[in-house]
């Protein structure tokens, strides 16, 4: 028996079909076509090609003036799957390793139920977004006039989360997920013989000093109560033990849970890298790329979502003050435009099937039981928000 008292086998099969045929950011043409066909079949007015491969299904019932938006992401990751499941990816090097197949299938399940039951008075905008995985699909849809074409009074989205009991709903008002920015640093010095270091300017030593100095920023410039992270994920230089290289490349990830810390991090990073490079007499070229902004849930919409969640899964399975996350999410750009709430649904704890495997892992799979939970939440949310 499901929460909605309906058979969701169709949508489990849809989820597994999507999983077997993953598409990367802005390449979701087959997925988008499938989504559009289903929405058309159920009576939605469908618009395609928003922000590239985005799809919006709109359904209006009655004379209500309010409109609600619900978003699901569709893209996969450039990962080779290692699950050996019957529905494992058929596309080598591409995998739904973050559960966007499950998010899409869940919203499709809700779409069918919402259209069949029509228990609302107003407008429902179902937003199927491309390119969440670092490519900024939300920004592309917004730039393409998403909210001018489909105005929303509130907007909602969810993500599955391994490590949390299956079906448990977790969120919090205010900042919930971190910003993410990226920096490439190219150091240029004078190469030379390993036995005559005084005749060279060593970029490896300079880069090593930069890596260590960057770690002082969070501990000495950011409020200890404000979480921030600086990670040097790559440091590439040299090719032989007796050659001092003339170039080094550093790739850096920067995350913060508030906009003030984000600004401080950028300022201090630039100053420290320039000063360190100067002290070692090497040239530093910095290429900063703004990523996703801090995801901030609005107070009233979060309270509303929590009330619906308690109705669906019970108060004991709802966490209203979930832990902030240093992962990032481009739904944050939509929340900058429209008040709303982003929440998590547990994919399974460590003691449950699939719970131990984190997203972005070749062994990950979405928990199909959550199609029921998410579809029920979406149906109840629409019914109550547009009562």
Image (cartoon, rainbow, N blue to C red):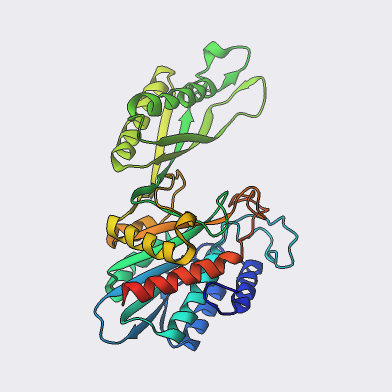
Decide: is 357 above or below 113.
Answer: above
Q: Which image quarter holds the C terminus?
A: bottom left
Nearest to the observer: residue 361 or residue 225: 225
Nearest to the observer: residue 346 or residue 268: 346
Nearest to the observer: residue 296 or residue 216: 296
Q: Which image quarter holds the N terminus?
A: bottom right
Nearest to the observer: residue 290 or residue 373: 373
Residue 349, given in percent of the width and then of the height, sits at 60, 50
State whether residue 27 appears in this view: no
* Left or right, residue 232 beside residue 367: left
Q: Quadrant of residue 225?
A: top left
User: Residue sitting at 32 percent across and 37 percent down?
Assistant: 261
User: Residue sitting at 61 percent across and 66 percent down?
Assistant: 368
Residue 384, given in percent of the width and then of the height, sits at 34, 73
Residue 240, given in percent of the width and then of the height, sits at 67, 25
Residue 39, given in percent of the width and then of the height, sits at 47, 82
Q: Quadrant of residue 192?
A: top right
Decide: is 204 above or below 68.
Answer: above
State whether residue 364 appears in this view: yes
């Amino acid at each position: 028996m499901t929460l909605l008292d309906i058979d969701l086998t169709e949508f489990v099969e849809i989820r597994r079909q999507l999983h077997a045929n993953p598409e990367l950011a802005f390449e979701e043409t087959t997925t988008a076509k499938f989504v559009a066909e289903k929405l058309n079949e159920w009576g939605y007015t469908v618009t395609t090609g928003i922000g590239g491969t985005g799809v919006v299904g709109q359904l209006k019932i009655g004379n209500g003036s309010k409109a609600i938006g619900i978003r699901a992401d569709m893209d996969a990751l450039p990962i080779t799957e290692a699950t050996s499941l019957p529905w494992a990816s058929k596309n080598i090097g591409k995998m739904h390793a973050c559960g966007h197949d499950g998010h899409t299938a869940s919203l499709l399940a809700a779409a069918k139920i919402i259209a069949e039951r029509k228990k609302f008075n107003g407008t429902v905008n179902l937003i199927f977004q491309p390119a969440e995985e670092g490519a900024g699909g939300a920004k592309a849809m917004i730039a393409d006039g998403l909210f001018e074409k489909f105005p929303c009074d509130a907007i909602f989205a969810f993500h599955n989360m391994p490590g949390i009991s299956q079906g448990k709903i977790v969120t919090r008002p205010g900042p919930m997920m971190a910003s993410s920015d990226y920096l490439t640093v190219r150091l240029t010095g004078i190469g030379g013989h390993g036995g005559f270091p005084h005749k060279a300017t060593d970029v490896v030593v300079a880069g090593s000093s930069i890596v260590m100095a960057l770690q002082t920023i969070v501990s000495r410039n950011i409020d200890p109560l404000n979480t921030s992270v600086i990670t040097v994920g790559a440091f590439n230089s040299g090719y032989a033990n007796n050659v001092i290289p003339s170039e080094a490349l550093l790739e850096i990830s920067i995350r913060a849970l508030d906009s003030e810390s984000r600004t401080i991090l950028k300022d201090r990073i630039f100053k420290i890298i320039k000063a360190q490079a100067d002290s070692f007499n090497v040239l530093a070229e910095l290429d900063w790329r703004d990523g996703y902004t801090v995801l901030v849930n609005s107070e009233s919409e979060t309270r509303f979502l929590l009330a619906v969640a308690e109705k669906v899964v019970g108060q004991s399975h709802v966490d209203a003050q979930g832990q902030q996350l240093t992962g990032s999410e481009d739904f944050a750009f939509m929340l900058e435009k429209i008040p709303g709430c982003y929440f998590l649904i547990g994919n399974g704890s460590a003691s449950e099937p699939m719970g131990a495997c984190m997203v972005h892992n070749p062994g990950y799979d979405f928990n199909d039981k959550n199609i029921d939970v998410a579809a029920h939440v979406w149906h109840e949310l629409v019914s109550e928000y547009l009562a």
